[in-house]
Amino acid sequence: MNHDSPLTSVVNQSIDVSSESSLSKQDLDKLINQNSENFVSHEQEILSLTALPEHACKYCGVSNPRCVVRCDICKKWFCNGKSGTTSHIISHMVLSRHHEVSLHSDSDLGETELECYSCGNKDPFMLGFVSAKTDTIVVILCRIPCSQAKDSDWNTANWQPLVEERCFLDWIADYPTPLDMANARAISPLDISKLERQWRSDETATLEDIKDLIDATAQYDKQLTESQGLNYISVSWSMSPHNYHLAKFSLSSYDSSNLKIAVGDEIILHYDGIKEEKWQGSGYVIKLPATYSEGFTLELQPSSVKPPTEHNVGFRAEIVWKGISFQRMQAALTTFAEKKSISKDLYDILLGHKEEQPEFTAKLPEAISVPNFTQLNPSQVNAVKSVLQQRLSLIQGPPGTGKTVTSATIVYHLAKSKKKKVLVTASSNIAVDHLASKLEDIGLKVVRVTARSRENVESAIDHLSLSSLVSNTNNPVLKKLLKKKDELGSLSKKDMNIYISQTKKAEAEILAEAHVVCCTCSGAGDKRLANIKFPYVLIDESTQPSEPESLIPIVKGAKQVILVGDHQQLGPVILHNGAAKAGLRQSLFERLIKLGHIPIRLEVQYRMHPSLSEFPSNMFYDGSLQNGVSHEQRLIRRSSFPWPAPGIPLLFWSSYGTEEISISGTSFLNRSEAMNCEKIISRLLSEGIKPHQIGVITPYQGQRDYIVQYLLMNGAHPDREIYQDVEVASVDAFQGREKDFIIFSCTRSNHTNTIGFLKDARRLNVAITRAKYGLFVLGNIKTLQKDPLWNRLLVHFRDKGALVEGRLDSFQLYTASLESARFKSTAENNGLNQGDNKGDLNSNGFSNPKFTAEDLSSTSFSSLHPFRANVDTDSRFASNPSIPSMSPFLNQPQWTNPSTFQLNEQIRPSTPDGPPVDLRFIQGLNLDEPISELTSRFNNL
């Protein structure tokens, strides 16, 4: 390929600009003297290095917009000129492993992301272009799988890569001219390598940068918590088995939907009586409302003042904010900075100082599977073997692939062979309890450490909790004091001092004898674990805690760390939008993938009917998921449900009822979908399916509340109370869980095709992978089909014969053609629609982090932003005779969309009857924008 620029005759001189990284002043003067007439008008264009624009190449300083490309990961610009044999942008991509780029707004193609037109793959090394068979346009497709597909519109057989001879094709990014190189810095490949290493260590970043993000999040969380005071509540009184007063209060669905309280939260209860009757007491939440019960149960702390149990009305509640978790994150960051908190090798790996892990020898056990426990499949065996021989390991566990069994096996071998303690953590108490139960099953001595505020919360593994083990200790002094405390409700000051001393002693003895300690990531910072070193740390669901939260268990002396998770499922929930955008929403698991650590993927799923696993496997996991269960094993023979495709328990039931704003004013409901949801549930119940086998998932709190109410009021089953055992919850609440049957209510249905955070691929992945025997999706095809991700899902349902409308007992296949999904503008995708997350059950009514391709690794097709799909082309494409052809392709196309381009007219979004419009203005009008005063104040920060 000829890399000489055709723009001036200078290229024909003796200096080969395409292969040299710099041009000396003497050479330039010589060329100017020889071609003075050609250069007179250009001398003023030579820029000084002291005044470089932001888009100048970070290596050499070239700033011609036609020649530079932006790395979308680190936001640095690099030119397409070469040092040695490789262009600067390609050098950066290789050395940094950053594989997402976009072009300058003043380039020939405009401000454009390079990505596959069909699937959204953004790795330039995977991208190429093909021409249309019937029009003068070309399209970008990835090498695999999209260019391999048979397509009647594109000449896929003539696919050509965008990167050739270690640089981008010149119609993507031009090659710098001698004028561009006149004042460029001379930089060698060795200098480039050194510079990239320096950037990896991030010399400009400080510890305070991350601490500031945690502080901002803490202050926002405090403001949010303290704003949740409740007035005029009614209280009913009872006594606990431990002789503590219990206060139970109920709220309306409106109040409870906006109230964010967790088990273990402290609440101060006030009674504003007349004169001397005023009272206040504090306690901890020990029970939350069930789906069909709005009662909170508060266990009051012992007090010398008796609560006014003779009164039931006139109370108010004040929620106490506790910043313990944030303090522990700050402490972990400070400890980590000391470098001695973990092994040096692990420290360097976590910071990206070492590209490859140092050698780590470990003797593997003869048998990988644990005796009398679940036998592992080959991918699980491979994961266990790899983990035992590496300082740092990442295990990606797609839905139903046995992450817990694999994790338990790893912990078993670490505990048995290393003879040292293993610390097992996760971000949620539910996940920790589940793993602790499995570890007990395989014969390990497990201690579950919980926050003291949760010690009286009922759990299936209460017998493993540190507080329970202390209560059952053989210490006679402690036993006597515990009995006295239970009988009297309190102890004297002298007895309390003895009790505290003996409790600490018993706790230390129990922890010393444990093989495994289980707690949340934040719980690893508990003072009771302060003097214990844990050389082996496993973090389950490791994509859910933020990176500082993950550091809390790691800085407990880790020498070997195992992260188990799935970056294709939900990530950290960071309520402070500024902190989220600044990087706090990225998990440690995701960042390590960006550094080049390839996770070990578990590949056999044991949850879903094979028909249910097909789409998520192909969409999110490169088609790698194998089925460990057969069609027969996931068939309920007594069921006669009218699945539209016999033998395929899959259904998308389209309804066209319009969405409505819920009672809170900040969420949505859809009555039509709620009615269809009831019909499905009632039909399943009539066929003998138990209510606890059915789960309803909806992203919107308003829809959740409405479905609950509708089932109780309109359920067709004779026993309406049976619906109380049907769980209706958010996507977040269902992560890591499963039901035999899942009904997913999309809720959004409008004429503007606004679907809010239904766009989030990770949420969709979680929602459609919870079902074992059957999946029902309720939504409006016309609203959803314009979104690329949903368009793909709808096509899948259609191809399976499961895309229907009409009545339950007389489904009609949806026969209308699906409209092509349209790619939205960069401005629209880059945060202007953050309010679309409004109404999610886990968002507290505020914007959650949005899924973008930048959040994920570029190491595989499936980890990039999912399908962009099928952007329409139209009659405005026209040839440009001034551009030389590159048979059979065209040489200088211009974009219509990030992956489809035309020859001479750049297309912008337009209204059906008018000129192009500003998408930001339309976006500002959608109902998903935050509307509460608190949110507005926060968004204006």
Image (tube, grey):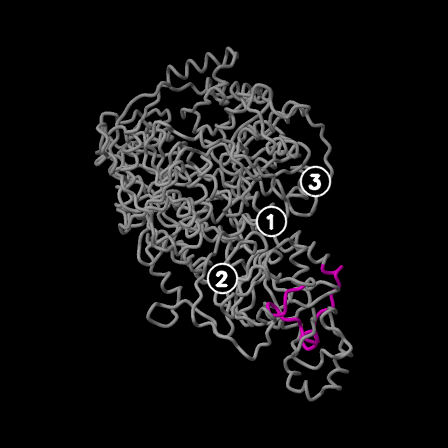
172 is higher (above) or lower (below) than 500: below
Q: Looking at the picture, which amino acid does disc 2 mark? A: Asp
Calculate the distance from the C-alpha at mark 3 to the C-alpha at mark 1. Answer: 23 Å
Is residue 178 covered in magenta? yes
Q: State left or right for residue 651 relative to residue 77.
A: left
Residue labelled with disc 3:
345
Q: Residue 830 got which mark?
A: none
Q: Residues within 10 Å of mark 1 (few under 14, many from 20)?
A: some
Residue 719 point in image, percent of width and height: 23, 27
Of the two numbered discs 3 and 1 on the same chain, state the one appearing first in sequence. 3
Query: What is the magenta range?
Result: 167-192
Chief SS of the magenta region = loop
Does residue 511 show up?
yes
Residue labelled with disc 1:
859
Residue labelled with disc 2:
153
Q: Residue at x 29, y 31 (%)?
A: 295
**Where on the picture, by quarter, is residue 332?**
top right
